[in-house]
Amino acid sequence: MRDELVWTVLVAFGIDLLLGDPRWLPHPVRLIGLIAVGLERLATRWLGRNRFSGTFFTLFIVGGSYAAVWGVILVADRIDHRLALGVSALILYTCFAARDLDVESTRVYGDLKRGDLVAARLSLSMIVGRETARLDEPEITRAAVETVAENTVDGVVSPLFFAILGGAPLAMAFKAANTLDSMVGHRTERYLKFGWASARLDDVLNFVPARIARLLYPVASLVCGLNVGNCWRIVWRDGLKSPSPNAGISEAAVAGALGVRLGGVNYYQGMELFRPYLGDPTRPLVRGDIRRAVHMMYATALLTLALLIGIRILIVTTQPWKLW
C-alpha cells in the first residue's frame, strides 16, 4: 500500500495514542482560539453582533486555518517531500483527542476512586462547560461519561473522517469550526445571532461522521463486552432527542451500551438547562462507567479508522471515476 495519506494518518493517530496533548506543547487549536477572541472583538465592533458578522468571523477563521496549514505543507514540500509528510503527520496529530480524552476523564475517575469529590469536581471542570462545584458523585460520573461520549465524535471520529478525506488542511479546518462552536455557538443572548454560523457549520460538518459512528457503536460495544442490542435500540430511539443533531447520537449509544440513563439538569453560569433523557435507568451510574465509556471511545475510533482506510483503499484501487 503506497497511499501516503493513509500512512500519514496512521502515524498521526499513533502519536496521539502515545503522547496525547501535553500542556507544554504549543497547540494549533489554542492559537485558533486566541485569534478568534481578537477577531470577535473587531468583527462585532465594525459589523455589529449579528448573523452577518458571525458568518464573516466563522468563514475567516475556518478558511484561514485551512489556508495556513495548506501553505505550511506546500513550503515544506518545496524543501523536501519527506519533510512535508512529517509536517502533515504532526499537524494531524494535533487534530486527534483520543488519548487526551482518556487521560482527563481517567483523572476524574481516579479522584472519585479516592473519594476526593473536591478534586473530582476540579478535574471535571477542565473538560466540561457546566458548573461542577455542587455536583455529587453520580452527577460527576454522568458529566464525565457524557463528555467522553460526545467528544468521541467531535475529537476522534470527525477528525479521522476529514483527515482521510482531505488531509491535514481539511482536518484542521474542521477543528477550527469545532473550536468556534465551543466558543461562540451558545444559545445565549450574547451569541444567539453572532454564533449562529459557527453552530450550524459544526452541525453540518459532524453530520456524516456522527452517522458513521451510529453504525459502529454497536460493534464497539460488542468489542468492549457491553450490551450490543440495547446500544442499537437506544441509539435509534433516543439519538435525535438532543437539541444538537449529532451530540445525542453518541450519548444515546453509550447510555444504551452501559444500560444507564444520561441527560438531565445542568447549570451554565447560574442558568438551569435541561437536556433530554437518553437511555433507560436500568441501573445507577457508577464511577467505573467512566472507564467503560473510554474503552468504547477507543473501540469506536479504531473501527472508524479501519473503515475509512478500507473505503479509501478500495476507491483508490478501483478508481471508479474512470468508468465514466
Image (cartoon, rainbow, N blue to C red):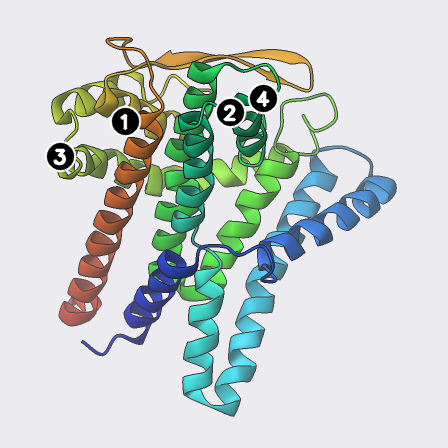
Residue farthest to the bottom, as pictured: 79
Question: Could you give the CA–CA distance between mark 3 and mark 1, rounded to whole angstroms?
Answer: 12 Å
Residue type at numbered disc 1? Ala
Q: Is residue 324 visible?
A: no
Question: Could you give the CA–CA distance between mark 4 and mark 1, rounded to whole angstroms?
Answer: 24 Å
| Residue at position x 64%, y 46% in the image | 58
Q: Mark 2 or mark 3: which comes first in sequence?
A: 2
Residue type at numbered disc 3? Leu
Quadrant of the drawing holding the C terminus: bottom left
Q: Mark 4 or mark 1: which comes first in sequence?
A: 4
Q: Which mark is residue 253?
A: 1
> Are discs 3 and 4 less than 8 Å apart at CB?
no
Question: Could you give the CA–CA distance between mark 3 and mark 4, rounded to whole angstroms?
Answer: 32 Å
| Residue at position x 42%, y 22% in the image | 141
Q: Which residue corresponds to mark 4? A: 132
Q: Position of residue 253 (x, y in %)?
A: 27, 26
Question: Could you give the CA–CA distance between mark 2 and mark 4, rounded to whole angstroms?
Answer: 14 Å
Q: Secondary structure at mark 1?
A: helix
| Residue at position x 41%, y 78% in the image | 85
Above or below residue 63? Residue 313 is below
Q: Mark 2 or mark 4: which comes first in sequence?
A: 2
Question: Could you give the CA–CA distance between mark 2 and mark 3, rounded to whole angstroms?
Answer: 33 Å
Residue type at numbered disc 4? Thr
Q: Which residue corresponds to mark 3? A: 222
Q: Which residue corresponds to mark 2? A: 116
